[in-house]
Image: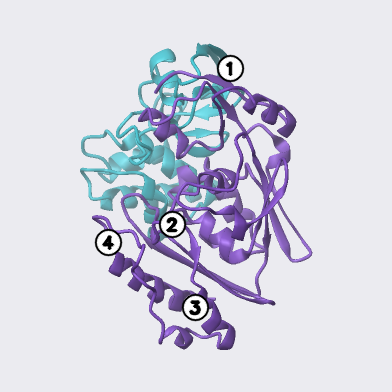
Amino acid sequence: MTDVKMTVNGKERSGSVEGRTLLVNFLRDDLRLTGTHVGCDTSQCGACVVHVNGKAVKACTMLAAEADGAEVATIEGMANADGSLGVIQQAFQDHHGLQCGFCTPGMVMSAAALLAENANPTEQEIREYLEGNICRCTGYHNIVKAIQAAAANGSAVAAE
Amino acid sequence: MYNFEFAKPGSVADAVSALGEDEAQALGGGQTLIPTLKQRLASPSTLVSLTGIADMVGISDAGGVMTIGGATTHAAVAAGGGAYPALAAMASHIGDPAVRNRGTVGGSLANNDPSACYPCGALASGATIVTNAREIAADDYFQGMFTTALEEGEIVTSVKFPIPERANYQKFVQPASRFALVGVMVAKHADGVRVAVTGASEGGVFRWTEAEEALNGNYSADAIDGLNASADGMIGDMHGTPEYRAHLIKVLTKRAVAAS
């Protein structure tokens, strides 16, 4: 067993993991942060996307031990401090960017990573960035609209 | 996944020492190895992570050569490989953004997947693969599908890419895997043109020497018109026949020359 310590959504968390423990299993089973989903478990679908040191990664294809000492952000950290939905989450609700919701945590985390890199992406850039996130419900159209709206709201906030 | 011990050394020397243990295996970004472990196709006793070795991360360019640390991610090359734009563009289309944030240059070259992009980039560039023990020319390094000149426990610490005068990589994406169904990189160096092909051959990445000769005489897409890549030894699967892949080699080579 390996002892790991990481900052998850701003809080110090620690645990003891096997070598083979995946980051997504540590988050879900040990920390009980079950918002991060396991869809395909083969690094195709992106339902497990979290941020490690600010970068989007597939938590099903990274060992928990590799995240020792890292800053990890999950969907549970995306809401505002008062519990209301964050800008991207609210945009997904407003634009019907989800139906069953299974892929949504990964979609929101990928969207957040994209907007951190590129505050005003084109539709094409959004679609390319979501190549590793699969949604079986929406046909992506409303997800793209939601991210465009979040980008517009984000820049409005920054401009104030 | 079978269980294993996990080690994350901070230096190349410590990593080499850890890899000397029985059944130890190096772990780069894990974007191929972790799925392989999940399928129980490998059962190392210890995984030795190379991502904690600061000396193996980074990009520098000097004297017409761009050097990339073996543990540098595809995303870092895409963002910081401006000295060799064709290579940075190639890195920016590997997998998807989350895969590019983990996957590494050294990991890709050590694995030598027959459909991966980096073996093609390294071969077309005439790169030198630098390990903890020696330097290996790309022409000697790739030895067939998933086979390289690396010895047991040898680590790709960096890769030196000579920057061509002109270059372009054309990737015909297999949309499910996001690997290349066929990929072609054309690089025009001062001492000649190199054309490398990935995704097509059962022997892994290879140089299309007939195209190189034609382009040495006349560097234009038209120079390829009279050539046809042979379908012998090409991969045939549900995504494409050997003939289809051979046809793609020609089409993509012409596109790469035109875009370079």
Q: Chain of mark 4?
A: B
**How far is disc 1 from disc 2 in space, using C-alphas?**
44 Å
- Asked whether the residues under marks 3 and 4 belong to the same chain, the reply is yes
Residue B211: image tag: 3
User: Which residue is label 1 attached to?
Assistant: A5
Task: Say what amino acid the circle numbered 3 marks.
Answer: Ala
**Does dot 1 land on a helix, a strand or a loop?**
strand
- The colour one sees for chain B in the rendered image is purple
For marks 3 and 4 on the same chain, the one whose residue lies earlier in the sequence: 3
Q: Chain of mark 1?
A: A
Residue A21 visible in the current orientation: yes
Mark nearest the camera among 3 and 2 is 2
Note whether B63 is above or below B37 in the view shown: below
**How far is disc 4 from disc 2 in space, using C-alphas?**
17 Å
- Asked whether the residues under marks 3 and 2 belong to the same chain, the reply is yes
Q: Chain of mark 3?
A: B
Residue sitting nearer the eye, A142 or B56:
B56
Residue A157 visible in the current orientation: no
- Asked whether the residues under marks 1 and 4 belong to the same chain, the reply is no
Task: Say what amino acid the circle numbered 4 marks.
Answer: Gly
**How far is disc 1 from disc 4 in space, using C-alphas?**
47 Å
**How far is disc 3 from disc 2 in space, using C-alphas?**
18 Å
For marks 4 and 2 on the same chain, the one whose residue lies earlier in the sequence: 2
**Does dot 2 land on a helix, a strand or a loop?**
loop
User: Which residue is label 2 attached to?
Assistant: B203
User: Which residue is label 4 attached to?
Assistant: B240
Residue sitting nearer the eye, B208 or B249:
B208
